[in-house]
Image: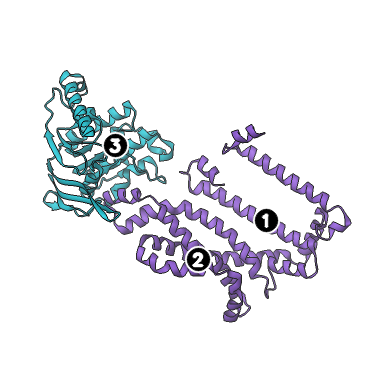
Chain colours: A cyan, B purple
Amino acid sequence: MIEVQIQEKAFSGHGNQQSVLRDVLFSLGDAEVLGLYGPSGCGKTTLLRIVAGLDRDYRGQVVLDGTPIIRPTPAVGLVSQRPVSYEWLSVADNIAFGARYLRNGNRPLDPLDEAARIGRLVGLSAQDLAKYPAEISGGMTQRMAFARALLANPKVLLLDEPFSALDFESRSDLQDAVIRARTELGTAFILVSHDPEEILYLSSRILLLSATPARVVREDTPNLPAHGRPDARYTPEFQLAKRTLRDWLAQQARS
Amino acid sequence: MVSEMRTAFRAPVSPAQQRAWSGLALVIVAGVWAIRSSSVEQSMFIPSPAAVIRAAARLQDSGFLLDIAASVGRILGAFVISAVLAIPIGVLMSSYKRLGAALQPLIEFVRYVPVPALLPLFILWTGIGETSKFLVLFFGTFFQLVLLIRDDANDVPAEYFELARTLGASSGQLLRDVLIPGLLPKIYDRLRVTLGWCWTYLVIAELIAVERGVGHVLKEAQRFSAADQMFVCFGVLGLIGLITDALAEFGYNRIFPHIPRSKVLART
């Protein structure tokens, strides 16, 4: 269980302070997927950086299973829109990179074997695993980044628009991998996306954030038929919910 | 022609084309050299290729290989010590900003003092022996290299470190697993460039009181207005540079197989 209580996060510059997040409070249970949906630039990425322990300059606290997060921890993973590749390592070594820092109980016996297993889960072949990041496509690099985050077996994985630049096939594969990780590994996710379809398809709960300074405007639990199944996207209820979300965002942009 | 230049702008060349263009340039230079040196008046200042080859044979008889070995030895000694000290200091200056702030003005100050101007002081401190030569080469490379390595270390993307931290890496592990491997190709390039600078300073270092060295041969050639011997020295220095560069390039492809060929070509 992770509890996020951010009273205020502000950036200072040119002699004044600009508030980015204000009174953002929520919690997240095991194996839950929380979607964050809001206008561009409203502070969603900043929020994820705070939850990941990468930004400590804010008022409030983030608590994971009773322990405040004051620095980055393998228990909270992060996959961003622009995936990071360690260019000098093969794809397999990139995926296994974090294994060396895990405690004995969590560390896989053979990190490269585990990298291959998780690589398969996200659609990477043995040939892909042997290549260097410079030799694979953007979609494959994103799969690699997602697999690397999963190998650390985090309790919460933060996804910052990780699939937005991908082709349809890669996006669908990785969305399904999120659902599998949630059900098979019990991983909880916080997903930031501008795509209402993705938010509705993956999230068990959705927080709607206002424009800067971002506040939680509404919390929704999409009660849609066949939720989490690929055919869920084609039901009238899903299409209606998608249109509602899109209209809400357009209204936010106008206001 | 203009349209060809437009299409050729930043267009890649194949290794075969590169060799062909390099060969053509050499032939043109050699041709101009042969024509210019053909007149008797010119031959004193621009000796013919044949005269240079004869001078090389004479120098060889007087132990020119030992001169080359002495120069290479001086370069390697000073360069290795300079690199061994500069790389960790540059990395630490980037990693620990307080240390960087403390050392930067000192290093910048020394960097701007022309090394030849320090030579009299080095001789005063250490005499005319090998140590003063070492100091010229060391001062010529160390301070520049420290700042280059620091800047390169600063350029390693912050995302590399943030990702490793979210995976649980400590400061020491960030240094070992992220900074050093991410920096190695740049270090390699910097060493290659600063090795070239070393050769520039070598000639200055060997102008004073040495018994052996290419710089010493050059100075002697100047005393006797022996342009042919000077040309031999230039040829040797250029050849050593070319061979070193070719070896460095050969090593680069093998040490850093992850860097795509297009990027390797773009560096050259």
Residue corresponding to mark 1: B238
Distance in Å between CA atoms under marks 3 and 2? 43 Å
Label 2 secondary element: helix
- Percent coordinates x, y for residue B202 in the rendering: 63, 66
Asked if badge 3 and badge 2 are on a common chain, one would say no
How many C-alpha atoms fall within 10 Å of the one at disc 2: few (<14), some, or many (≥20)? Answer: many
- Identify the amino acid type marked 1: Gly
- Identify the amino acid type marked 2: Phe
- Percent coordinates x, y for residue B241 in the rendering: 63, 55
Distance in Å between CA atoms under marks 1 and 2? 25 Å
Instruction: Tell me the chain of label 1.
Output: B
Q: Nearer the viewer, residue B253 or A3?
A: A3
Label 3 secondary element: loop
Q: Can residue A87 be seen in this view?
A: yes
Distance in Å between CA atoms under marks 1 and 3? 52 Å
Q: Can residue A72 be seen in this view?
A: no
How many C-alpha atoms fall within 10 Å of the one at disc 1: few (<14), some, or many (≥20)? Answer: few
Tell me the tag on residue B143: 2
Mark in the foreground, 1 or 2: 2
Residue corresponding to mark 3: A162
- Percent coordinates x, y for residue B108 in the rendering: 48, 66
Rendering quarter of residue B232: bottom right
Label 1 secondary element: helix
Q: In which quarter of the image is the N terminus of chain B?
A: top right
Left or right position of A105 against B221 = left
Left or right position of B140 against A123 = right
Look at 77% across and 60% down and name the residue there.
B56
Q: Nearer the viewer, residue B131 or B110?
A: B110
Look at 19% across and 46% down and name the residue there.
A21
Decide which of tag 1 and tag 2 comes sooner along the chain: 2
Total tally of numbered discs in the picture:
3
- Identify the amino acid type marked 3: Pro
